[in-house]
Image: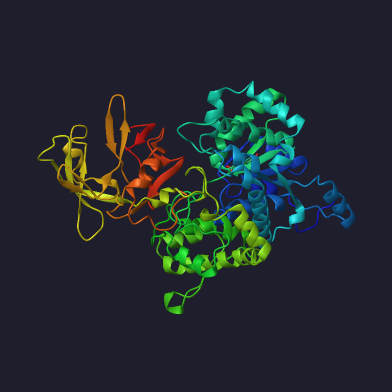
Amino acid sequence: MTTNAENGFSPEEKLRLIKRNLQEVLGEAELKKILQEKDLKVYWGTATTGRPHIAYFVPMAKIADLLRADCEEVLGEAELKKILLEGKDLKVTILFADLHAYLDNMKAPWELLQHRATYYECLIKAMLESIGVPLEKLKFVKGTDFQLSREYTLDVYKLTSLVTEHDAKKAGAEVVKQVEHPLLSGMIYPLLQALDEQHLSVDAQFGGVDQRKIFTFAEKYLPQLGYKKRIHLMNPMVPGLTGDKMSSSDDSSKIDLLDSEAQVKKKVKGAFCEEGNISNNGVLAFVKYVILPLSQNHEFVVQRSDDHGGDAVFTDFDALEKAFEDKLVHPGDLKPAVAKCLNILLEPVRRKFDTPEMKKLVSQAYPPPSKKKGPKGGAAGGESELSPSMLDLRVGRINDVKVHAEASALYVQEVNLGEEKPRTVVSGLAQVVPLDDLKGRLGVFLCNLKPRTIQGTPSQAMLLCAAQEEPAKFEPLGPPEGSAPGDRVYIDDYAVGEPEAELKPKKKIWEKLQVDLVANGDSIVEWSGHQMKTKLGPVTCRSLKNVSIK
Ligand SMILES: N[C@@H](Cc1ccc(O)cc1)C(=O)O
């Protein structure tokens, strides 16, 4: 086996490439051993659920590293053809986990599954091409292509007799959507992901650190079936352009891979990126995890006019980060530079999808809400008419609280909701929440209920509380620190469009949505497993866990 000059990496160099920018490696000793002997066989899986967005460039950049470390033996064309025909010996596999998309609370409904898998495949291939990864060096597999075989199925049953309910739940806790009435499918999900390692014949699985519990689960259980424990490579969770985990979909920040050049510019411009502040900075993170690793000449250029110091060229991230922290690089210069690189990456993807067939595929995989009526507002991505985006939820400051003159169970509050005038809000909390707990504090208010008159006093919004039944306990929801009156509160993945002007009482929209609102086991508020948040982070309650929201 020959290696060419460019790619003849030593095992140490391969290790460095494989590990760069990773947060954690489980099984490093084994990894080193394998690299001494052969190439690493590794896979990355993605569940074909919602529309992938630009954060997917982060694992893509890693896949490029893995391929480069794959030693790229010089193959004769005949040899290459043979390998391609047999579909084996390719070292890096991408799995489109369609079955997983279904098992995870039907994030992808059954009838859309095939379209979603095709959409992911086209999109991810376009991304890889855009970053210069030769597709013929990768193997692409769809979950249902091998997970329904007799052998695989038997392994699933065997695992169900080994794995405790506790371990299955724990493994999926950060990946599978957490809902009030968890389904069996969510427990099987980690079992299948573990078995994929065996049935894809890999040495290692790569994923974000959010997969860690599934990875350690696989390490524990595969040996119990007599299979080898695999190596696990983990990317950090990269902050999104609004400053939190990038799986979010605050519509103003999430950049779809098919967004126009102008949209990309605008969204990057609106990104959270304060001068001198390097923490949670999604713009800097994008340079670190995507732009620099992918740059041909290992350069990132911040173009500036001469009176702003002229162009600044960075070849390593630490130098850029330091310059930003020392305020030598201004967000006003950094953002356009990142938007420009991003648009270069996205241009080929947009072009590929700019055909009638591709447009059809997009609308089949993600049918617009009007075309498809869901049974109820449970499915992801606006597939049904009822959506939490209809709620006008906002942060409000309770300027003043009094007990209602005629009803001792009621408080009358004056609330600043970032509008010209404060609103009056009547709530039945007088006997359950001390007055001083409310005065001056920030809360989350539903602002588009039809105003009602309660005991002669008009109420113009509703304060949301976590509510425990036995013993009865109420805690007003708390927006993240640093919030201000008027800040928009939304449900993650549902921050699309404008809320309804007024919720028609007959339609019972709030009542129907409220059923799925809970404070979860970490006191974080969720609707059907999607966090309630503001641009600054999740909404929480002080201490109640696993209770409903009223
Ligand atoms: N759990 C992965 C998807 C996945 C599914 C199956 C696998 O074998 C690997 C990965 C995710 O969160 O997207």
For image coordinates 41% across by 35% down, the residue present is 520
Quadrant where the image shows the C terminus: top left
What residue is drawn where x is 78% and y is 42%?
38
Identified at 56% across, 49% down, the residue is: 50
| Residue farthest to the front, as pictured | 506
Give the side of residue 117 with respect to residue 401, left or right: right
Residue 105: percent from the left, percent from the top?
54, 38
Colouring: rainbow
**Residue situated furthest right in the rendering:** 78
Ligand 1 location (quadrant)? top right
**Residue placed farthest to the top in the image?**
161
Task: Say if 266 sits above or below 184 in the image.
Answer: below
Quadrant of the rendered structure where residue 162 is? top right
Q: Residue furthest left?
A: 405
Q: Position of residue 14 (x, y in %)?
A: 69, 48
Instruction: Count the marks.
Output: 0
In the image shown, does 138 or 324 lie closer to the viewer? Answer: 138
Write the residue at 67% across / 59% down.
126
Q: Visible in this render: residue 480? A: no
- Left or right: 139 with respect to 247? right
- Out of 130 and 534, give the one closest to the viewer: 534
**Residue 291 visible in the shown view:** yes
Counting from the top left corner in percent of width and height, residue 222 is at: 67, 28
Q: Position of residue 502 (x, y in %)?
A: 32, 54
Q: Say which of 186 and 367 sits in front.
A: 367
